[in-house]
Amino acid sequence: MATLLQIAAVFGVLSLLAFGGGAAVLPDMQRQVVDVHHWITSREFLDMFALSRAIPPGSMIVVLIGQKTAGIAGALVALLAMFGPSSLLAFALGRIWHRAGAAAWRETLEQAMAPVSIGVTIASGIAIARSTEHDWATYAVTAATTLLLALTRLHPLAVMAGGALLLALVGGG
Amino acid sequence: MATRSTPEPPGLGALFLSFLTIGSTSFGGGLLGWIRRELVERRRWIDDQQFLVFYGISQMVPGATNVNLSVIIGTQLRGVPGAFAAVAGLLLAPLAILLALGALYFAARNVPGSRLINAALIGAGAAAIGFNLATGIRLAHHNIRRIGPALVAAAIIIGIGILRIPLLEVLLVMLPASLLVTLAERAR
């Protein structure tokens, strides 16, 4: 029980610090769970990061840390603690927005937010590509996928399967 | 809003199923693209402008952006139960898979999967990044009509994507800047 409370406390705080998404708090998380609480080793942290990296919606590494530390209960507590507090904030801000109804300032702010959100969408894609991709093959897959999905009606799963297959042939062979 | 069509809100079950689909298809990445594809293009429960505003709000609070976005969209469509339905649907499949992977890992003390699987995952990830980029391009094509907003988007792309300035700092500068652009265009 004490461990579950500690898990809730550690991830609950990280949840509120994760501006820009969960990646922002990964170094802090590693320090807390490896150095401070000794729940897992730093090798395990890296393994868990690799395992959870492709699992949506991000930050799912907390499930593995919780599972290793306190079983299924630990996994669920970690998940709730990581997403709960930030979800409450998102809910509150969404509510304020909703309540504003047809207020003139809301209409203006909405117009102003559109290009910002679009910019962030494209910028995040570029930033993630630059931090995770290091060879011509991955850059080529990203570039080709971008063009295909922006210009055609191909199903994204088909295109992603193509990317997976291509790199399995190039990198795994 | 008077100018905005408000279609029949979906049932909680339909909302849950849509997010279950989103959570199940977005392994490897591209979650933002899947959310827009399912809710804006296929179901038409929200429109592009709402999607962009909700995404903007999701960025302003800490936490996984896509979870925040699901909370806000769920709330918008079906209130508090809608938020729970959306997030539960989103997380169910990833959680189940991850617990199974975790059990395997703790049993084998080894990351399951060979070099081949790893390479395939990297390929799917690279394609998923392309999916999100394509979503951004489509959004820009549909929603940016004038030079002012185009410059705002371009500045953000350069700031975060090229110069690697932290998101929060870019938002603190560019949100007010975009507001000024909007007001200036309106005054003309």
Image (spheres, helix red, strand yellow):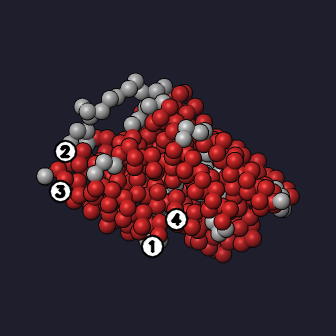
- Give B80 or B76, whichever is nearer the viewer: B76
In the rendered image, the residue lying farthest to the bottom is: A35
Tag of residue A18: none
Q: CA distance from mark 2 to mark 4?
A: 35 Å
Residue behind mark 2: A104
| Residue occupying image coordinates x 17% and y 56% | B184
Circle 2 or circle 4, nearest the eye? 4
Kind of element beneath mark 4: helix
Are dots 4 and 3 on a single chain?
no
How packed is label 1: few (under 14 Cα within 10 Å), some, or many (20 or more)?
few
Task: Say which quarter of the image contains residue A30.
Answer: bottom right
| Residue to which mark 3 is pinned | B184
Badge 4: chain ID:
A
**Residue A53: % across, % down:** 66, 58
Q: Quadrant of the C terminus of chain A?
A: bottom right
Disc 2 or disc 1, which is closer to the eye?
1
Q: Residues within 10 Å of mark 2 (few under 14, many from 20)?
A: few
Residue B106 visible in the displayed image: no
Q: Residue B183, position in %: x, y?
A: 19, 54
At 60% from the left edge and 56% from the top edge, which residue is drawn? A142
Q: Which residue is mark 1?
A: B163
Residue identifier under label 4: A127
